[in-house]
Image (cartoon, rainbow, N blue to C red):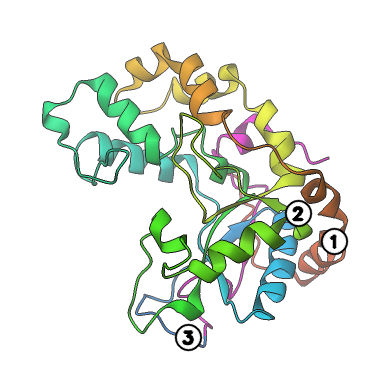
Amino acid sequence: MTVLSAEQLTGRVRSHVLDVPDVALDAPNSTRGTGGTGSAACVLHPDAAAAFLHLRAAAAHSDIDLVAVSSFRSFQQQLTIWNEKFQGRRPLLDQDGRALDVAVMTAEQIVRAILMWSALPGASRHHWGTEIDVIDRAALTQGQRPQLLPQEYAPQGLFGRLGQWLPRHCQDFGFFLPYDRDRGGVRPEPWHLSFAPVSGAALPALTVAVLAAALEPSELVGREVVLRQLADIHARYVCAVAQPTAAALAAAALAAPVAAALAAARLNPAARPS
């Protein structure tokens, strides 16, 4: 069982992740351009990276070009997202996807609105290197950009085939969908995969105390409100997720040979203390 340190759990270091080439939207060596900069990278825990390569290969047999649009995200990256939403410099949406006006909201209302769609810095599962937001690149037309909205993954949506394929097959490669339905916290995210053997151990390790220690010295906008409500936020927006299936946990052995190969090839390690 992989054990992450407090700094790794909260995204304050990158010592547990590495770059995985050519599996991200707009990856430099992609043969299917999408109008991006070519600078995208998929950054994952080595075990999750190996499993994702297996999953991607399986998807290809169904004519799905499975690529990542988001993977590891540092504490600082999540902090920037949070602060810009709190200050109205990024769109803030209600539960139906409608824009909100932070100028007429209390700090408590803003915190709850952000948490509906974005994680608190230090509390994002993306800090662990186990989480991947995925699309079917083959479904995009030239220059088209995904929005990561539930309707895109509905049967008649842009990624409708992927939305049906993932729940059937992802657990065979160690993944599950943590935000499969609304549990009163984070909205459903049919694009969000989690690598069960690592994330299953990470979640109970991310305690309120660990999270508070990361937040207290930070420049989080609304920090006093967040710290006052931290126990409730932790219960509702961190812990209220689907549990890994037994099949996903058992599939960890599949990743071992590829993980070893990744390490041997020295795949652009992102593992640098920060």
User: Residue 216, how many percent across, how many down?
Assistant: 44, 19
**Which residue in the structure is indicated by mark 3?**
32
User: Is residue 122 in the magenta section?
Assistant: no
Q: Amino acid at mark 2?
A: Gly
**In the drawing, does residue 52 fall left or right of residue 109?**
right
Q: Are marks 2 and 1 in contact (CB under 8 Å)?
A: yes
Q: Quadrant of the N terminus?
A: top right
Label ID, residue 65: none
Residue 152 in the figure: left or right of residue 101: right
What residue would you read off at disc 1? 254
Q: Earlier in the sequence, mark 2 or mark 1?
A: 2
Query: Mark 3 or mark 1, which is nearer the start of the sequence?
Result: 3
What is the span of residues highlighted in magenta in the rendered image? Answer: 1-30
Kind of residue sitting beneath label 3: Arg
Left-right relation of 172 to 141: right
Nearer-N-terminus badge (2/3):
3
Q: Is residue 34 left or right of residue 265?
A: left
As drawn, the label of residue 174 is 2
Residues packed near mark 3 inside 10 Å, few (<14), some (14 to 19) or many (20 plus):
some
Dot 3 lies on which element?
Answer: loop
Pointers 1 and 3 in contact (C-beta within 8 Å): no
Q: Name the residue nearer the viewer: 256 or 245.
A: 245
